[in-house]
């Protein structure tokens, strides 16, 4: 299992930023490698993402479920991505905390990766992930600075709905680290 964490300082209030982080059009424009993103319901997103690690650049069909929202401070999601000879399952959380200059966005994610992309090793995956996340936050800050219109579309899946996207037995990390 790979684990990622980070923090980004943004100039806007968390209430202003919430709309950006929960608008699928804005997310699609900011997510590196996003070829398509479709809101299926307020808690389900389908996406097509092309992510390159070294010479491997699979195109994933991604199913995302919003598992928790607490306006304007917490957003949690799970996602499963499938591509030929590659697969991933991830859980991500984002916290928006006010500070003197705007908002601190803290994020964390865990991911199980299998297939060709996993054979490149955890260090390579972490390096690429950190670069992509950095680009995502830079692009998101630009959208917020430009005042691009954004409207919150996401809400948590109902508690009685099964949000399991896969089991731990289905996705295993193959890393030579």
Image (cartoon, rainbow, N blue to C red):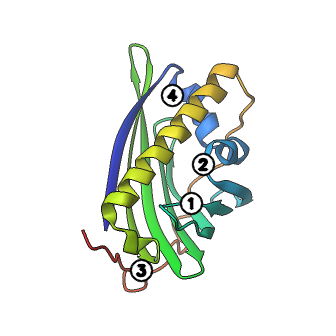
Q: Nearer the viewer, mark 3 or mark 2?
A: 2
Residue 51: assigned label: 1
Q: Secondary structure at mark 2?
A: loop
Q: Nearer the viewer, mark 3 or mark 1?
A: 1
Q: CA distance from mark 3 to mark 1?
A: 18 Å
Q: CA distance from mark 1 to mark 4?
A: 29 Å
Q: For the residues labelled 3 and 2, say whether their Cβ atoms are less than 8 Å apart.
A: no
Q: Earlier in the sequence, mark 4 or mark 2?
A: 4
Name the side, left or right, on which 40 lies relative to 166.
right
Visible residue check, residue 160: yes
Along the line of sight, which residue is nearer the eye, 51 or 39?
51
Name the side, left or right, on which 10 lies relative to 49.
left
- Residue beneath the point at 53% across and 75% down: 162
Q: Nearer the viewer, mark 4 or mark 2?
A: 2
Q: Earlier in the sequence, mark 3 or mark 1?
A: 1
Q: For the residues labelled 3 and 1, say whether their Cβ atoms are less than 8 Å apart.
A: no
* Horizontal and vertical percent position of residue 132: 50, 47
Residue where numbered disc 3 is placed = 171
Q: For the residues labelled 4 and 2, say whether their Cβ atoms are less than 8 Å apart.
A: no
- Residue beneath the point at 64% across and 45% down: 27
Q: CA distance from mark 4 to mark 2?
A: 23 Å
Q: Secondary structure at mark 4?
A: helix
Residue where numbered disc 2 is placed = 32
Visible residue check, residue 46: no
Position of the C terminus by quadrant: bottom left
- Residue beneath the point at 38% across and 13% down: 100
Residue where numbered disc 4 is placed = 14
Q: For the residues labelled 2 and 1, say whether their Cβ atoms are less than 8 Å apart.
A: yes
Tell me: residue 35, above or below residue 170: above
Along the line of sight, which residue is nearer the eye, 132 or 64?
132
């Amino acid at each position: 299992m790979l684990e990622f964490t980070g923090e980004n300082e943004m100039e806007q209030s968390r209430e202003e930023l919430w709309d950006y982080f929960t608008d699928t059009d804005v997310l699609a424009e900011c997510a590196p490698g996003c070829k398509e993103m479709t809101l299926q319901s307020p808690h389900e997103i389908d996406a097509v993402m092309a992510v390159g690690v070294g010479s491997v650049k699979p195109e994933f069909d991604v199913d995302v479920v919003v598992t928790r929202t607490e306006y304007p401070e917490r957003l949690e999601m799970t996602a499963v991505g499938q591509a030929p000879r590659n697969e991933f399952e991830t859980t991500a959380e984002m916290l928006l905390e006010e500070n003197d200059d705007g908002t601190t966005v803290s994020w964390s994610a865990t991911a199980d990766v299998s297939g060709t992309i996993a054979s490149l090793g955890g260090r390579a995956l972490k390096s690429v992930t950190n670069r992509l996340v950095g680009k995502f936050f830079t692009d998101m800050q630009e959208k917020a600075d430009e005042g691009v219109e954004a409207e919150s579309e996401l809400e948590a899946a109902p508690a009685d709905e099964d949000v399991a996207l896969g089991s731990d037995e289905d996705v295993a990390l193959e890393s030579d680290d």
